[in-house]
Image (spheres, grey):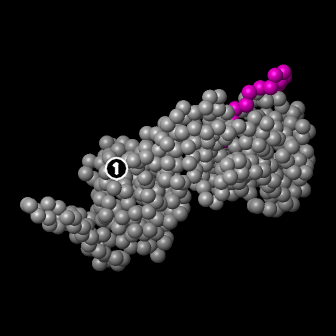
């Protein structure tokens, strides 16, 4: 795997330049620049149903070969991978990838277009014709393989992977891959790395470009991790491979290649905010105007919601977004949509999500139930504000089978609504009361918070 935003300068004397289009080239290309590719813009399989195969093609037989290419080019390819490139009627890849395998190019070549989804469509139109797609490193690790696979029967795909940049980095550093945290920063918010900043942990971050190491250093320093050690690994596997290290609080080395990843050895300073993956963050971690599910009730609510990998949450009446944010922190594969009618609170939710390492949180600005129309159906729903019979009905109908609805109520009117819902639909109803020690004159006594009535129900 190589960073998507590779840029490689022209070699002296290069006579030709490939344009970023789908016009075929019958002459092996000379490379001057590389245009970024994104593997996140592909349409769903339903949008790109495989067309009728070419005449004489037996359905289910392999016609598309994915070949992983490392920085060493042809020298790192197996005999089968080389044969796949030589025998293909068409070879598709980036300018840099085509340059790396130039000696093997005999027939037509195409460049991936922008947007990437167009490439999926054009590729499927060739179904049944021997085609080779080049990828960086392992095509199924943050790569094109995982994007193409849903669109075709697996019997029509063959793959010859090369070592990913992560494998090469772990080998250079002597780190055990299974013990590392891995985060891709390709076109993503730097905040994606925040959830993994735990003392003593090691992280491999796939960089977007040459600026990523400096940006990471600034972010870590701002968050109290300035003493962390960063190692910038450049052009792994190639003749220009280089590894240089510095502290996050220090200036990064000069002339960093766009082909880099950053290895982080996390060291936390006093006062650094550590984002737990279980339990709940302190209330002070969130910017809020008082509309916040408090820490203890939040922990009980998340326990009731039962986050699981890959599940989607609707946080209706999100307030500060605390439930949605902690849902996302529970697992990297979780997704969440915060629904909030107040514009100022929406901006606050965005700031909280970015600050707390969950920039992928989606936000729907509007009042429920109208704002719920058209949203991706959820596996779980939390209603923390604005519950009424209409909102309950719309949420229940939208909830996927096997999903769970959890509603918290503080006001007596909402509590009465939950009592009726419990009587009509069943589920579980409980009353949560938290008391904290507080000064009582010259002594200490228990001060109760407002009790919360919680209703939860599973959809069979």
Residue in view at x 68 percent, y 39 percent:
243
Above or below — where is 296 with respect to 92?
below
| Residue 127 point in image, percent of width and height | 80, 52
Q: Is residue 10 magenta?
A: yes
Q: Give coordinates of residue 203: x percent, y percent.
A: 58, 50
Residue 241 visible in the current orientation: yes
Residue placed furthest toward the left:
441
Q: Is residue 319 left or right of residue 109?
A: left
Residue 360 is left or right of residue 315, and the answer is right
Nearest to the observer: residue 334 or residue 150:
334
Residue 345: say if magenta.
no
Q: Mark 1 falls on what kind of element?
A: loop
Q: Position of residue 381 (x, y in %)?
A: 41, 63
* Mark 1: few/some/many CA within 10 Å (<14, 14-19, 20+): many
Q: Position of residue 84 (x, y in %)?
A: 88, 49
Camera sees residue 370? no
Foreground residue, 181 or 391? Answer: 181
Look at the magenta stretch and give its main secondary structure: loop
**Residue at figure coordinates x 62%, y 35% from the top left:** 209
Name the residue rendered at 27%, 53% in the picture.
291
The quarter of the picture where residue 247 lies is top right
Side of 58 relative to 3 (left or right): right
Q: Is residue 69 left or right of residue 361?
A: right
- Residue on which the image places disc 1: 286
The residue shown at (74%, 57%) is 152
- The residue range painted magenta reads 3-17
Q: Looking at this view, is 25 or 222 the one in front?
A: 222
């Amino acid at each position: 795997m190589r960073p998507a935003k590779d840029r490689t300068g022209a070699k002296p004397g290069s006579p030709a330049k490939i344009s970023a289009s789908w016009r075929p080239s019958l002459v092996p290309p000379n490379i001057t620049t590389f245009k970024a590719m994104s593997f996140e813009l592909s349409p769903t399989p339903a949008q790109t149903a495989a067309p009728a195969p070419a005449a004489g093609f037996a359905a289910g037989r392999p016609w598309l070969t994915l070949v992983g290419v490392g920085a060493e080019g042809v020298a790192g390819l197996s005999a089968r991978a080389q044969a796949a490139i030589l025998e293909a009627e068409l070879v598709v890849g980036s300018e840099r990838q085509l340059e790396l395998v130039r000696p093997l190019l005999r027939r037509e070549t195409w460049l991936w277009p922008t947007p990437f989804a167009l490439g999926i469509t054009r590729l499927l139109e060739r179904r049944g014709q021997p085609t080779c797609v080049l990828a960086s490193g392992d095509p199924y690790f943050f790569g094109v393989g995982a994007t193409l696979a849903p669109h075709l029967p697996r019997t029509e795909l063959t793959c010859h992977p090369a070592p990913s940049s992560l494998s090469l980095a772990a080998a250079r550093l002597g780190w055990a891959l299974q013990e590392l945290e891995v985060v891709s920063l390709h076109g993503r918010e730097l905040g994606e790395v925040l959830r993994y900043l735990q003392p003593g942990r090691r992280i491999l971050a796939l960089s977007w470009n040459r600026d990523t190491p400096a940006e990471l250093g600034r972010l870590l320093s701002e968050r109290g991790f300035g003493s962390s050690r960063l190692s910038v690994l450049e052009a792994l596997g190639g003749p220009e491979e280089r590894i240089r290290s510095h502290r996050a609080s220090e200036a990064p080395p000069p002339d960093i290649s766009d082909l880099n990843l950053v290895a982080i050895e996390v060291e936390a300073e006093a006062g650094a905010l550590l984002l737990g993956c279980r339990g709940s963050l302190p209330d002070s971690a969130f910017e809020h105007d008082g509309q916040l599910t408090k820490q203890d009730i939040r922990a009980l609510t998340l326990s009731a919601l039962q986050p699981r990998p890959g599940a989607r949450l609707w946080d209706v009446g999100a307030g500060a977004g605390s439930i949605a944010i902690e849902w996302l922190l529970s697992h990297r594969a979780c997704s969440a949509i915060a629904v909030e009618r107040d514009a100022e609170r929406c901006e606050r939710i965005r700031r909280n999500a970015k600050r707390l390492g969950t920039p992928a949180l989606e936000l729907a600005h509007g009042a429920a139930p109208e704002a719920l129309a058209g949203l991706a159906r959820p596996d779980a729903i939390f209603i923390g504000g604005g519950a009424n019979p209409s909102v309950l009905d719309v949420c229940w109908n939208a909830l996927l089978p096997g999903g769970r609805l959890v509603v918290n109520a503080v006001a007596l009117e909402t509590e009465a609504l939950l009592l009726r819902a419990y009587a009509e639909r069943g589920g579980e109803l409980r009353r949560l009361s938290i008391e904290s020690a507080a000064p009582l004159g010259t002594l200490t006594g228990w001060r109760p918070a407002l009790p919360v009535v919680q209703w939860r129900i599973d959809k069979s």
